[in-house]
Amino acid sequence: MHAPADRALRTPKAVQTRVLAACFAGKSNRQISRELGVDRHTVGRILSQQEVRSLLEEYRQQARELVPGALAVLENKLLTKRGRPRARGVDWKMCVEILKGTQVFVGRTDQDVNHKIDEIESLKDGQLIDFINEKLAGLGLARPGKA
């Protein structure tokens, strides 16, 4: 039998904090449970507390508000004023990490994504540019600078 959600948790604050941090990092309840050695239902109870839900929503809203500015900075770093990809000074691995973080290429299993990530990490800058252009073309998006 589980404690009602409105009853105070007996889980130490340090554990609750680690659960919350793992949630902020985008981990599922099962992942958090395995990694921290905390029962999955306890993880759920910690994350279902009203104050935690409110805090999570507040942080998510703050992150959403940062997106337009972050995309503008990224676009400035990636493209010339003519809209063409910059040839120098671009950290393509960072770009791929950003794309992964925004989940642009969703719809795959975790195993497929992790396997693809391992492949991406071994690519050189030129290969990363080709990879990104292939993905853009596959999504029906024009490559920057090409009409």
Image: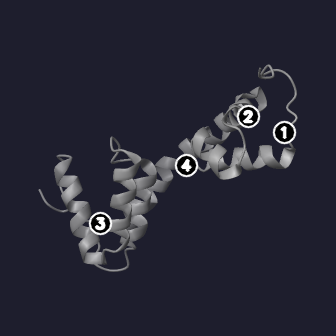
Among the two numbered marks 2 and 3 on one chain, the one whose residue lies closer to the N terminus: 2
Mark 2–mark 3 Cα distance, whole angstroms, equals 52 Å
Among the two numbered marks 2 and 4 on one chain, the one whose residue lies closer to the N terminus: 2
Among the two numbered marks 4 and 1 on one chain, the one whose residue lies closer to the N terminus: 1
Mark 2–mark 1 Cα distance, whole angstroms, equals 8 Å
Mark 4 and mark 1 residues within 8 Å of each other at the beta carbon? no
Which one is in front in this view, the residue at disc 4 or the one at disc 1? 1
Q: Which residue is mark 3?
A: 81
Kindly identify the amino acid type of the residue bearing the numbered disc 1. Answer: Thr
Q: Which residue is mark 1?
A: 11
Kindly identify the amino acid type of the residue bearing the numbered disc 3. Answer: Lys
Q: Which residue is mark 4?
A: 66
Give the structural element (helix, strand or loop) at label 4. helix
Q: Please determine whether, in this image, residue 137 is positioned above or below residue 94.
A: above
Which one is in front in this view, the residue at disc 1 or the one at disc 3? 1
Q: Is residue 39 left or right of residue 72?
A: right
Sort mark 3 into few (<14), some (14-19) or many (20+) by Cα contacts within 10 Å.
Answer: few
Q: Please determine whether, in this image, residue 6 is positioned above or below residue 58.
A: above
Kindly identify the amino acid type of the residue bearing the numbered disc 4. Answer: Leu
Depth order, front residue of 41/82:
41
Mark 2–mark 4 Cα distance, whole angstroms, equals 32 Å
Mark 3 and mark 4 residues within 8 Å of each other at the beta carbon? no
